[in-house]
Image (cartoon, rainbow, N blue to C red):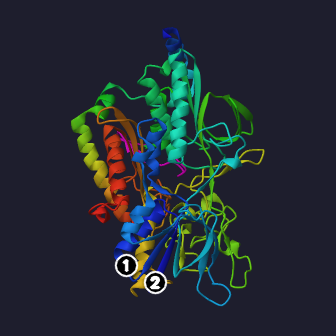
């Protein structure tokens, strides 16, 4: 299994995966950080509410 | 006194009927005709498809609810529309055929003053040979019954993985012109999550197959978002999500046929390829319900009301023109049929003027392009606006040829939350909002959309939002206290 993992890693550069951005440690931390995510939840809610309001005329 | 007949009880139809019943006094009649016994909150079917929710958690029975609200419910399918009435009467009516309530097979005519056609999509598994859970080889998550079946099939795959057997899992779009990429994308992330949390992801090869030109197109021609100081296409955002999980993808592919264990697809470059699978969930093509329309003398006027795909003709600009000349103003605003303005078609039922994504054709003549999405949030908004317009006409505040409320997809935004996992801390979502849904190149010449309100954000927040929305929208649909304060 470990060897298969290794194979996948060394050939990654020759696949579609090589073009995709992979998140680093900090990004992954903030994606799960409860305080930061609570703030983002509020921001997302406000933005979505405004989008819904714009949708009716 | 006015009588409003609503065909369909999905997000658009249910919203229209609920608001009309709230605003109109009981001297006006609201009738809902729908073959469905249950209202289902379709976005949550994904969770049914991975065993995280039971069908009962995403649905409720319509008849008792409508009885309580004072809505006349007929569990029937609409067969034909007679917008000029019939022999001896000018009163327009629809012919319906019961499928439940102990009247199965009986036909009836239901007259109306206003007709709301919110019939939603017919799942056309028959358009791709071998597709679908009933007569084909694939599963689906398009309704709660399909999703429940998908989960039982997925469990078999998980058992094989646990036994050390390698499995190929393919999830995506099952027709060159099908839509609902968001649902397929969400399902693949959830399937990955379920396999990965059992420590089996090394044994599974998971592939996303789609008719999108680029991953992240989501049938809206993709979008641009601000991320970390750059303006990036949603392609980067969506591919990153797949690459992080080592989910492979095949884009620009039109699935032509599904055999047991083998998917046949054509690529935009004209090649015919095969993809092996052990478990496949592929979204079918959609069409309208195939209703007929007749004039007063019984002459067939179906083409005045419907496009050949069964979706209703509305106030859109259907003139054929090249992609470069498409305009935001092509999209309908009041969703009225031009020949019979007392007929409305909110939600999936209306015929879009064209796709949103640029259409491409393979050298073999196969057009590979996703159809425009009109589900969820836009359907709810269109349903409410239709109810507002009908209410104002009934109350004499507006006229049918000059309605005040508009719901054009080129002026409305949408949120698409692709959430994987379950629970407060054990989830991850890609939240995408776009404003407007259809690019308006006149208003936003650089990127077609507002960069303030078009965004993409991965994180736990979106997952909470999706969870919150499940309960909020079911609260609203069930008509619980203050439901009308909740946005669509």
The rendered magenta stretch, by its main secondary structure, is classed as loop
The residue range painted magenta reads: B217-231
Question: Is B262 in the magenta?
Answer: no
Badge 1 or badge 2: first in the primary sequence: 2
Answer with the quarter of the image where residue B290 lies. Answer: bottom right
Tags 1 and 2 on a common chain = yes
Disc ID at residue B2: 2
Asked whether residue B288 is in view, the answer is yes
Residue B351 screen position, x and y as percent: 60, 64
Can you name the residue that lies furthest to the bottom here? B88
Left or right of residue B56, residue B251 in this image: right
Residue B412 screen position, x and y as percent: 43, 62
Left or right of residue B219, residue B412 in this image: left
Q: Which residue is mark 1?
A: B24
Classify B200 as above or below B129: above
Can you name the residue that lies furthest to the right here? B364
Can you name the residue that lies furthest to the front here? B102
**The C terminus of chain B is located in which quarter?**
bottom left
Q: Secondary structure at mark 1?
A: loop
> Is disc 1 surrounded by few (<14), some (14 to 19) or many (20+) residues within 10 Å?
some
Answer with the quarter of the image where residue B264 lies. Answer: top right
Answer yes or no: do the residues labelled 1 and 2 have beta carbons within 8 Å? yes
Question: Is B225 in the magenta?
Answer: yes
Which residue corresponds to the image point at 49% horizontal and 73% vertical from the top-left? B334
Classify B104 as above or below B129: below
Classify B111 as above or below B370: below
């Amino acid at each position: 299994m470990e060897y298969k993992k290794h194979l996948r890693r060394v050939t990654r550069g020759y696949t579609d995966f090589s073009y995709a951005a992979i998140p680093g440690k900090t990004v992954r931390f903030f994606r799960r950080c409860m305080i930061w995510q609570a703030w983002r939840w509020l921001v997302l809610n406000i933005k979505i509410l405004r989008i819904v309001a714009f949708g009716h005329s | 006194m006015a009588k409003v007949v609503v065909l369909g009880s999905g997000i658009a139809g249910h919203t229209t009927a609920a608001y009309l019943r709230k605003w109109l006094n009981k001297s006006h009649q609201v009738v809902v005709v729908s073959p469905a016994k249950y209202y289902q909150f379709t976005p949550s079917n994904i969770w049914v498809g991975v065993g995280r929710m039971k069908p009962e958690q995403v649905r409720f029975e319509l008849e008792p609810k409508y009885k309580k609200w004072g809505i006349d419910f007929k569990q029937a399918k609409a067969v034909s529309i007679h917008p000029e009435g019939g022999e001896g009467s000018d009163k327009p009516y629809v012919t319906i055929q019961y499928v439940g309530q102990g009247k199965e097979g009986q036909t009836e005519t239901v007259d109306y003053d206003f007709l709301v056609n919110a019939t939603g999509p017919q799942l056309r598994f028959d358009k791709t040979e071998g597709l679908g859970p009933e007569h084909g080889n694939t599963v689906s998550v398009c309704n709660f019954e399909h999703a429940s079946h998908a989960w039982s099939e997925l469990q078999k795959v998980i058992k094989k993985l646990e036994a050390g057997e390698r499995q190929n899992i393919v999830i995506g779009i099952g027709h060159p012109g099908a839509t609902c990429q968001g649902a397929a994308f969400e399902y693949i992330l959830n399937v990955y999550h379920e396999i990965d949390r059992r420590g089996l992801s090394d044994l599974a090869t998971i592939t996303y197959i789609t008719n999108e030109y680029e991953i992240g197109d989501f049938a809206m021609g993709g979008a641009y978002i601000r991320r970390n100081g750059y303006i990036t296409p949603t392609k980067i955002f969506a591919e990153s999500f797949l690459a992080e999980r080592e989910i492979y993808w095949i884009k620009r592919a039109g699935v032509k046929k599904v055999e047991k264990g083998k998917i046949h697809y054509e690529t935009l470059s004209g090649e015919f390829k095969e993809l092996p699978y052990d478990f496949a969930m592929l979204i079918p093509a959609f069409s309208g319900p195939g209703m007929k329309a007749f004039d007063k003398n019984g002459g067939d006027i179906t083409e005045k009301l419907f496009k050949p795909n069964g979706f209703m003709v509305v106030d859109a600009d259907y003139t054929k023109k090249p992609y470069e000349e498409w305009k935001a103003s092509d999209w309908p605003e009041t969703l009225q049929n031009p020949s019979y303005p007392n007929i409305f078609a909110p939600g999936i039922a209306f015929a879009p003027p064209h796709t949103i994504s640029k259409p491409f054709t393979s050298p073999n003549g196969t057009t590979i392009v996703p159809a425009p999405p009109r589900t969820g949030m836009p359907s709810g908004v269109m349903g409410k606006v239709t109810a507002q317009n009908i209410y104002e006409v009934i109350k004499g505040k507006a006229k049918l040829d000059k309605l005040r409320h508009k719901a054009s997809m080129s002026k409305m935004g949408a949120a698409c939350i692709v959430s994987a996992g379950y629970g407060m801390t054990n989830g991850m979502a890609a939240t995408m909002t776009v404003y407007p849904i259809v690019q308006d190149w006149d208003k936003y010449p650089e990127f077609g959309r507002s960069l303030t309100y078009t965004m993409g954000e991965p994180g736990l927040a979106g997952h909470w939002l999706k969870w919150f929305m499940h309960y909020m929208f079911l609260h609203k649909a069930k008509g619980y206290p203050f439901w009308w304060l909740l946005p669509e």
